[in-house]
Amino acid sequence: MSLIDRARLAELLERERATYAHTHPRSAEAFAAAEHLFGRVPMPWMNKRAGAFPLYMASARGAGVVDLDGCRYADFALGDTAAMAGHSPEPVVEAVSRRLADLGGATAMMPTEDAQWVGAELTRRFGMARWSFALTATDANRWAIRMVRAATGRSKIVFHAYCYHGSVDESLIVVGPDGEGVDREGNVGAPVPVTATSRVAELNDLDALERQLAHGDVAAVLMEPALTNIGIVLPEPGYLEGVRELTRRYGAAWIVDETHTFSAGPGGATAAWSLEPDLVVIGKAIGGGVPCAAFGMSAELAQSLTDRPDLDLVDMGGVGGTMAGNALSLAATRATLAHVLTDEAFVQMIDLSTRYTDGVRALFAAHGAPWTVTQLGARSEYRFTPTAPRNGTGSHEACDDDLDDYFHIYLANRGVLLTPFHNMALMSPATTTDQVDEHLTLLDGAVADVLG
């Protein structure tokens, strides 16, 4: 990053932070008053921010957000995919209102017919024959892990370094200096050393993956088909096919977590790239803003589990939750899949993402900035590196917190929101061409300022 004058960057950050503080007094007051919240926020991750305090939401519709101070934003964060359908899409509002007001009963210890509809639609999209529901992808991943451990009689799970599977304990593992696994930095209150439950390999390294599988104790490889939360890192040609071949050869299941890679298309990367996993996990986006997640498995795996009288799949076997599969979540999910995140909507979303990606690439070239931008369907992200990282560790090492903060706060001060954790811009069915073009115009100004 020798082209960046760090003293100038520090001055620009100070300028933008001062503007941010001046423009958002009510958010600052709300944050200062939140004495009864741990970290002064509902969840600690809300303290990932470029300014001295987080922005507080007042309202949100479509691809726009309004904060407590009345500032309006084009929202390209979209809840880090949780609001990929847009904020409060009308079909979801209608379905939730009908469930709550007309029919009544947000949750009861009874199924609703919406569950079968959603299961059938997920089968159409992702190919898995049997589905079960959760409220978060974290829980769906935990339960998928339990299923494969029961099915294989093995204990360990292989992950990719710097993967994202929510707060699953087993996944907080990265590659250490000797090529073997170590706890990811900052792992809070790990119940056991992470190497007791997990193994790790870098994305795009089939030799390393085979070395881990060769131990014979691996129940499954749980992976995003492309890394996302460390910046988008795409699989190289042949890598995913190699993962499938190796897992079959070594008797391990293959779990594909589509929670973020759902942006690749209506059936995620599984359908877009013709993958053949044994289980699929999906969360966040499918509920249209209402908590819902799901995991699906092949008919063969499902049958092998239900045929086991020793497994308590009904009561206290460790899989489930009283609120999982509730009537309200499934009404929202049915409406989202049927009317909002449709096959046709993804065409529009991906086209907009391509427009954005091409625009970012062009403005970087115009400014002589040796930076990269990577697209994953409706999701796009730029990195401050001359070539796109090929694995999680490389992507982690490429992080530049000051530059990230500068671009985030510069854009926020001018009415554009990016995902706080990285430079991701996501398109929803409600996102407009005008919003994309305005984002590009502002980004052009941000690059010009920082490069001087």
Image (spheres, rainbow, N blue to C red):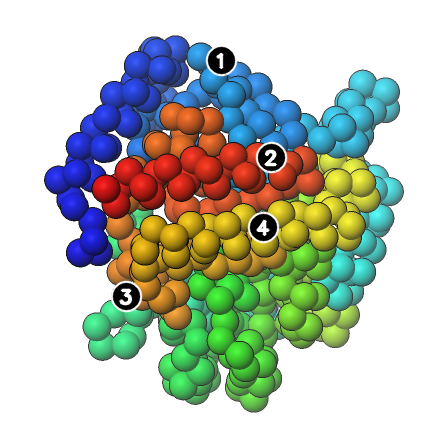
Question: What residue is rendered at 16% in x and 46% in y?
Answer: 5
Distance in Å between CA atoms under marks 2 and 3: 46 Å
Can you tell which of label 1 and label 3 is closer to the viewer?
1
At label 4, the amino acid type is Arg
Task: Residue 367 in the image: state x and y as whole percent.
Answer: 34, 51
At label 3, the amino acid type is Val
- Mark number for residue 355? 4
Q: Are marks 2 and 3 in contact (CB under 8 Å)?
A: no
At label 2, the amino acid type is Asp
Q: Mark 3 or mark 4, which is nearer the start of the sequence?
A: 3
Distance in Å between CA atoms under marks 1 and 4: 29 Å
Is residue 14 placed above or below 29 in the rendered structure? below
At numbered mark 4, what does the secondary structure look like: helix, strand or loop?
A: helix
Q: Which residue is mark 2?
A: 434
Q: Residues within 10 Å of mark 1 (few under 14, many from 20)?
A: some
At numbered mark 1, what does the secondary structure look like: helix, strand or loop?
A: loop
Question: What residue is rendered at 34% in x and 32% in y?
Answer: 409
Q: Are marks 2 and 1 in contact (CB under 8 Å)?
A: no
For residue 267, what is the image quadrant? Answer: bottom right
Distance in Å between CA atoms under marks 2 and 1: 21 Å
Q: Which residue is mark 3?
A: 182
Q: Are marks 1 and 3 in contact (CB under 8 Å)?
A: no
Task: Residue 207 in the image: state x and y as whole percent.
Answer: 40, 86
Tell me if residue 101 can be seen.
yes
Along the line of sight, the residue nearer the viewer: 434 or 216: 434
